[in-house]
Amino acid sequence: MDTGFLIDRAVAEIRAWEAGWGSYDRHPAVEVPADRAAEALKVFTDRLKDNYPFFHPRYAGQMLKPPHPAAVAAYVAAMLINPNNHALDGGPATGAMEKEVVRTLAVVFGFPEQHLGHLTSSGTIANLEALWVARSLKPGGVVAFSAEAHYTHARMAQVLGLETRVVPTDASGHMDPSAVERALQDGRVSTLVATAGTTGIGAVDPIADIVEVARRYEARLHVDAAYGGFFRLLAEAADPRLTPETRRNLLAVSEADSVVVDPHKHGLQPYGCGAVLFRDSSVGRFYRHDSPYTYFTSDELHLGEISLECSRAGASAAAFWLTTRLLPLRADEGLGPILGACLSAARTWHGLLAASEDLAPLRAPELDIVTYFPRVESARAAAIDQASRAVFEAAMTDPEDPVFLSVLRVPASRVTLNGRGVRRDRNDVQVLRSVLMKPEHQGYVPRLHRRIEAIARHVRREVA
Ligand SMILES: Cc1ncc(COP(=O)(O)O)c(C=O)c1O
């Protein structure tokens, strides 16, 4: 699908709509001379090229990729109008679109029809709202989250003045249900946060077991599915690329009291699109506020009445709405096959890493994040750390054929080589990390693997 074609069509429609309102004179103060505009635009686009090629499969680093062309076209078209989804006064059409996409998200997560939810400008704000509602329900309660939860939970708990408790993870990066039980035993934890797809390695916490523990201790369960939430589509369809455990835990997200998902991660959206959903719509009461400036044009629910943020881009809702129209949130078409290709890419690469003489996998990927490190002569943590860093830097800066990766710090106790633990001459080790969130990675992974193998060999020769 050609982005230019979609943008041209969408912009032409909006311009025609604008023309229908009658002519008026644009103020000369907003006009800029064409030659100055062209010059500034050239400087601007040249500066933009100081970026990593997030669109290309040779970029296999962080959680980054451009939005789908449909999202771009819808965002641009809506942005020309610039609706504000805070109130229906500010964006009636995009407000309605937001309500529709949130209903679709509720279906994805198996939430009841009577849920409450809205889009946010990020996963951070969405999680903040979930913790804020939790605090409103039980002031003074403690929030518990895993050692591998996103740092946003500790930060937002600090913003809210909440006491926190960190639940240790096991060797595979999951919260251990018995550790959860120990954390909840004294009855002070009012909110337990589980992660469906950790930022580091994409681990899905044992939500199916944790939910039972949380219920027993009357703690609220919040699931941060900012990264991994959309994989629930494949879990519903019993996709064999997910292990039975991962599948069971993704399905159990429907038991949570609240859930966060980021359409700007795996939902093909540009930044500025998170979402929070609550099982019990009555939590809407905590958002109640009076505004002398807004909420005039309709008695229907205004999104600002159920969100903490005030102004929010209606264009975000528009982009997500059009994207899901063309690529539905389903396992068998639309988003499902895209996510499936990412899972396949990760599994293929894991197989190549396991058989490689130059690279070794850290662990099998649960979703689409692959972690690995160069095989080194001496099985020492410091040697692996150094070699990973050297491969990372060489790969990123190669002038001819670069590949873009990221690094992850893991405890040395988690690293094994040839089935044995490594000598722990340091506590943590940097390993290489690739988020394979573009479906194009499926075809490109063998090339990526060969290139990184070659860099690892080169680095080893340099060190020797
Ligand atoms: C699991 C998880 N939660 C929360 C966040 C924070 O989301 P955002 O960057 O949209 O604020 C991230 C970001 O990577 C994440 O992976």
Image (cartoon, grey):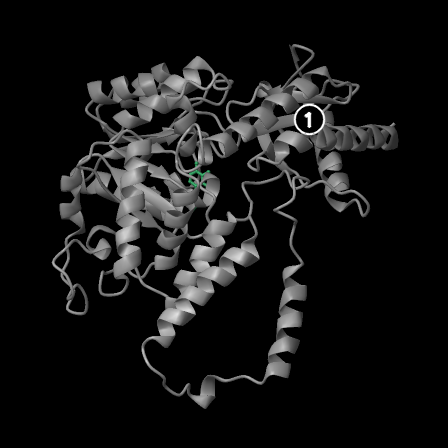
Q: Is residue 241 left or right of residue 55?
A: left
Q: Is residue 30 left or right of residue 459?
A: left
From the top left corner, tell me how far across and down residue 359 is, in percent. Answer: 73, 23
Q: Quadrant of ligand 1?
A: top left
Q: Give the residue drawn at x 43%, y 43%.
A: 326
Residue 327 in the image: above or below residue 219: below
Q: Give the residue drawn at x 25%, y 60%.
A: 92
Residue 245 in the image: above or below residue 14: above
Q: Is residue 293 left or right of residue 44?
A: left
Q: Quadrant of the C terminus?
A: top right
Element type where label 1 sits in the image: strand
Q: Residues within 10 Å of mark 1 (few under 14, many from 20)?
A: many
Q: Give the residue drawn at x 33%, y 64%.
A: 83
The foreground one among 46 and 127 is: 46
Residue furthest to the top: 419
The foreground one among 147 and 52 is: 52
- State the image quarter where residue 141 is shown: top left
Q: Which residue is mark 1?
A: 373
Residue 111 in the image: above or below residue 68: above
Q: Give the residue drawn at x 11%, y 58%.
A: 299
From the top left corner, tell me how far across and down residue 389 is, in percent. Answer: 71, 36
